[in-house]
Image: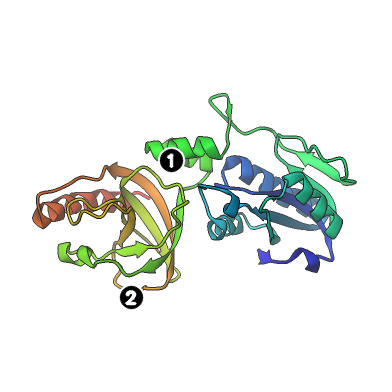
Amino acid sequence: MELIKLKDIEFTTCTAIGRFDGVHLGHRAVIEKCIETAKTRGISSLVVLVDDTEDLERYLNDIPERRYLISQINPDYLAIVDGRGRDLDFIYDDVVEKTSTECLVCGDEPLSTTKLDVEVLSIDSMVYEGNLIDSKMCERYLQSGDMEVAKFLLGRDPLILGKVIHGKGMGRSVGMPTANLLFSDKKILPKRGVYVSKSHVLEGAFVGLTSIGRRPSIDQDENVTIETYMLDFDEEIYGEIVALDILEYIRGIEKFAGLKEVKKQIDKDMEVAKRYALHR
């Protein structure tokens, strides 16, 4: 996938346009239809990602995460356009006007615009238990801790993409040095708790544990942190970007009497992660 600006597109495309927050099953179906159609017609597939994050109070994925997830589906090109205060139909018109779009792929909602002189292809609705799969549905299951359904709706493991920052170094005191991830306060996070996770960093993938929430056994700080520990990993990665897959919920955040009890519980959690790694 190549990142491109609309003004640089001088070739014929099959295009999918959207905000794609969550890059869930419905979004993936639209993008995959775009890629499939482009290949069949011998043209290029283009995804136009509308950046609406400034207008939102909360979102499942920020633009770097959406870009990362779309790259895994692998259209030929990705263009990112500013969507602040702009109606999506206007953006459709703008993209068609500025590019050589042969056809558009959209979801089950019909376009209300009347300006488009281009073929429009639609896909069948993606539903779960009779309801349309959308970002709100993904949010509900993600925050309930029902990872099995959340993964199904997303068509993938939930993702957190973040830069490793300096923490308080408390993980080392219990034999588990962690990477602390920087994230937006707008990001909708999974249910607070401890998870089996997989970290993609330095061209490797490492199963481990991730804690999402407060640290009541260590301090009284009310801020939510994301701390991840990777099995068989001992590299200096401050400043690196980690793509963190949230795999399986283990337990909620608990307050322990002291570091000895914390270490005992972490050892139990590690066994869960090790078993998961063996059978994954």
Disc sitting over residue 236 in the figure: 2
Tell whether 252 sits left or right of 1. Answer: left
Name the residue located 55 percent from the left edge and 40 percent from the top edge. Answer: 135
Q: Is residue 90 visible?
A: yes
Q: Is residue 11 left or right of residue 218?
A: right
Q: Would residue 99 be seen by someone viewing this image from the given angle? A: no
Q: Amino acid at mark 2?
A: Glu
Q: Residue furthest right?
A: 117
Tally the numbered discs: 2
Q: What distance separates the C-alpha of mark 2 from that of mark 1?
A: 31 Å
Q: Position of residue 261 (x, y in %)?
A: 11, 51
Write the residue at 82% across / 48% down.
103
Disc marking residue 142: 1
Colour setting: rainbow
Above or below — where is 177 with respect to 266? below
Report the disc number at residue 227.
Answer: none
* Quadrant into which the N terminus falls: bottom right
Please tell me how crowded label 2 is: few (under 14), some (14-19), or many (20+) other residues with Cα within 10 Å: few
Quick one: 173 or 147, which is closer to the camera? 173
User: Judging from the image, what secondary structure is the residue with disc 2 in?
Assistant: loop
Q: Earlier in the sequence, mark 2 or mark 1?
A: 1
Residue 48 x, y percent position in the rendering: 70, 55
Q: Could you tell me which residue is drawn at 13 percent across and 48 percent down?
A: 256
Q: Measured along the vertical axis of the image, is residue 128 above or below residue 27?
A: above
Q: Residue furthest bottom?
A: 236
Q: Secondary structure at mark 1?
A: helix
Could you say where residue 126 lies in the image, as x and y percent from the top left?
62, 34
Task: Residue 192 in the image: state x and y as whole percent.
Answer: 33, 45
Residue beneath the point at 32% across and 70% down = 166
Structural crowding at the residue carrying mark 1, measured as other residues with C-alpha within 10 Å and reported as few (<14), some (14–19) or many (≥20)? many
Q: Amino acid at mark 1?
A: Leu
